[in-house]
């Protein structure tokens, strides 16, 4: 599923009451709860068991990394957390919503309203200004033009691009593109920022700058989940969940200054 599908419009409707309830009536400490989650894919006449009895909890305001090599299952877990794929077995509660019971329309709403996505390849729309790229989720959420322009400009200022709001993606460096993507991820005040290999296309300096942005966002109260294969990137977070062969092999708090 690409960025266009994730951010696609949903007829400008509000999130249904059963999805919205947790944001107002119940302030949950646990924003993600997964229990015994399994996922398999058909491979010819057989199947590949990618996630094996995954159970984990993420609290509001946490800053964590899902760390593992290619093929470990971390990307599949990310897709399920981001409601871009569905689990086969188990339960997944996201901010008070039972995701395994949600219909596709509800999942579309959740992706637009509850999760801010940051992708390795930026996924910015070409020949569209930084300002317009940041506005996209707000357009799909039905926000009025004047309000979304003001908010988009403020978000770009927040990530240090206040002087480049009218620049096109091809006029920006890789690090600047990723900052636009972070601003876009914040557009609808999501419950979770989900970053998929956010430094994978960046040089070392830009990578560290992007991770500092995530660190600052977390200090401001955002729940941030970074999916990565890099130890030094995971070390920026406060908790590392290590993945191997479709299973969680360790789940530890980070001691700052070491991996």
Image: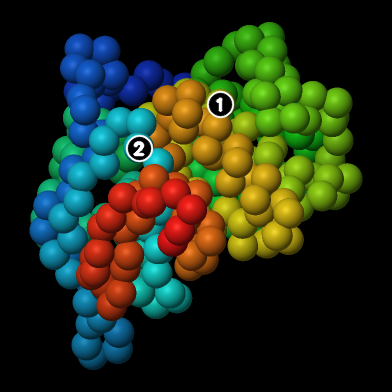
> Is 107 displayed left or right of 172 in the figure?
left
Any part of residue 102 in sight? no
Q: Which residue is mark 2?
A: 62
Q: Which residue is mark 1?
A: 187
- Please, what secondary structure does the residue beneath circle 1 have? loop
In which quarter of the view is residue 204 placed?
bottom right
Estimate the x, y position of residue 185 in percent, counting from the top left: 55, 35
- Gap in Å between the C-alphas at discs 1 and 2? 20 Å
- The answer to which of marks 1 and 2 sits earlier in the sequence is 2
Of residues 238 and 23, the one nearer the viewer is 238
Q: Residue furthest bottom?
A: 45
Of residues 234 and 175, the one nearer the viewer is 234
In which quarter of the view is residue 44 placed?
bottom left
Kindly identify which numbered label has been placed on residue 42: none
Estimate the x, y position of residue 91 in percent, counting from the top left: 13, 49
Estimate the x, y position of residue 63 in percent, counting from the top left: 40, 41
- What residue do we see at 28% from left, 77% from top? 245
Q: Of the residues tagged 1 and 2, which is closer to the observer? A: 2
- Please, what secondary structure does the residue beneath circle 2 have? loop
**On screen, residue 43 above or below 171:** below
Any part of residue 229 in sight? yes
Q: Are marks 1 and 2 in contact (CB under 8 Å)?
A: no
**On screen, residue 193 above or below 220:** below
Estimate the x, y position of residue 243 in percent, counting from the top left: 31, 68
**Total marks placed:** 2
> Is 186 displayed left or right of 168 in the figure?
left
- What residue do we see at 38% from left, 51% from top? 255
């Amino acid at each position: 599923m690409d960025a266009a599908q994730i951010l696609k419009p949903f007829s400008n409707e509000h999130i249904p009451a059963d999805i919205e309830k947790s944001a107002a009536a119940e302030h949950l400490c646990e924003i993600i709860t997964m229990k015994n989650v399994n996922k398999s894919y058909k491979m010819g006449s057989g199947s590949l068991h990618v996630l094996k009895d995954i159970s984990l909890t993420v609290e509001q305001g946490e800053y964590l990394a899902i760390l593992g090599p290619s093929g470990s299952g971390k990307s599949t877990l990310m897709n399920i957390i981001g409601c871009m794929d569905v689990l086969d077995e188990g339960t997944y509660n996201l901010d008070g919503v039972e995701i395994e019971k949600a219909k596709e329309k509800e999942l579309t709403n959740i992706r637009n309203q509850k999760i801010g996505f940051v992708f390795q390849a930026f996924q910015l729309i070409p020949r569209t200004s930084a300002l317009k790229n940041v506005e996209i989720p707000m357009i799909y959420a039905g926000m009025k033009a004047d309000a979304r322009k003001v908010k988009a400009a403020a978000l770009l200022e927040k990530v240090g691009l206040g002087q480049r709001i009218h620049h096109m993606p091809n006029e920006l460096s890789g690090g600047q593109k990723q900052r636009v993507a972070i601003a876009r991820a914040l557009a609808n005040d999501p419950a979770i920022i989900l970053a998929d290999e956010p430094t994978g296309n960046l040089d070392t300096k830009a990578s560290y700058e992007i991770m500092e942005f995530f660190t600052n966002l977390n200090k401001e109260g955002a729940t941030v989940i970074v999916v990565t294969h890099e130890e030094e990137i995971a070390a920026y977070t406060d908790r590392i969940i290590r993945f191997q062969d479709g299973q969680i092999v360790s789940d530890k708090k980070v001691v700052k200054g070491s991996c």
